[in-house]
Amino acid sequence: MDMHKEAEANDKFIVKYRQQYYDLSKFLHKHPGGLNTLKGLKSGDMTSRFLKAPPHSDAAMYLMKEYKIEPEDSQKIKSSHKEAELQEGNGAIRQRPRETEDKNNNQVDESMEHLVDWSKAMLPQIANITDCYDEWVHKPVDRPLRLFGPWYLEMCTKTPWWLVPTFWIPVIIRCAWEDLASSWQDRSQLAVFAAYFLFGVLLWSFLEYTLHRWVFHVKLSSNSGSWLCTFHFMIHGLHHKVPYDPKRLVFPPLPGALLATIIYTPLSLVLWHPRVVLSGALAGYLCYDMIHYYLHYGNPSTRAFVHMKRYHFHHHFSHQTLGYGISSPLWDVVFKTRIHLRKLRYQLRWS
């Protein structure tokens, strides 16, 4: 092995769990429980600590299989484990005490991914797995996903995070500018402007909750039609299946503009200052999308954002039928779908 390959191998974060080996190098900064909770596990056996930790969900255990490595990749670390276990004198390998069974681990279904071909476009395949789609889509993986076959359609499904504020900030300013300019010299009118703008923000938070709960998480069963499963996967299911896809964490601007137009048109007939309300709602949406991206890939240091990150990851991996609020827990409290997180003894970090 040349020096470059040896250095690369030494940088890998390989751990042992129940006689299997996992390369967590690409998962460290994605770990919902923080990077610091994995401290000291590199090249070691994490079985004991894992079993003493709070139980991991079935979804988390399923995701763990993504990082399992083949025996030849783990030969070096196997040798180090054996050397550490050799008894002095007779050279016999010390037998470790048997661990109690982890029921979560036993519940893992390892047969779901053969139902689809990950080398092909995924959307056309959803119609073939409608009888078990709801179970499959909530078993997360960490791998590239192609939604459409043609490159020009696939390109439209991927959105870098910076494109969202670039598109929407000018729209928000344009919607609010005329009313803001006319009320700038009149404090009473400025107060009215602020009130309607804040109403728009509140309106968005309600839309965020209702869309997430009753549209994105529409109840599916084995009898759900292929069109419903396909639609669900396209608008939200893919996010739960591949939660770490950085290009599919924010909503593409053009479909977003279409949705905003559909919602705004009837409301503009009954609301006063509809453009101000729209600008507030779009500002709320923009904050939501940026927060959502940050919760997946950011390294929050404040208590509020750490709580939000933990809250959202619990929605992904433990409580898919709770925790629908992302930018605010307000409506989760109102509709009693709030996730109650346990208190931590230390601050989590992701870098």
Image (tube, helix red, strand yellow):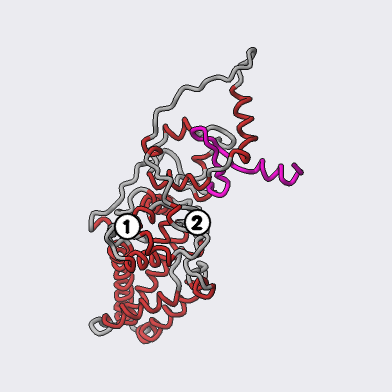
Q: Is residue 61 left or right of residue 336?
A: right
Going 30% across and 54% down the picture, which residue do you hit? 321
The tag earlier along the polypeptide, 2 or 1, is 1
Question: What amino acid type is highlighted by mark number 2?
Answer: Tyr
Going 43% across and 67% down the picture, which residue do you hit? 124
Looking at the image, residue 195 lies above or below residue 317: below
Whether residue 334 appears in magenta in the rendering, the answer is: no
Kindly tell me whether residue 96 is visible in this rendering. Answer: yes
C-alpha distance separating marks 2 and 1: 33 Å
**Most foreground residue, 301 or 23:** 23
Q: Which mark is nearer the camera, 2 or 1?
A: 1
Q: Position of residue 70 (x, y in %)?
A: 58, 41
What residue did someone put label 1 on? 131
Going 53% across and 49% down the picture, which residue do you hit? 29
Q: Give the quarter of the image for residue 76.
A: top right
Q: Is residue 184 left or right of residue 15?
A: left
Q: Which label is found at residue 237? A: none
Going 31% across and 61% down the picture, which residue do you hit? 217
Residue extent of the magenta highlight:
1-28
What residue did someone put label 2 on? 297
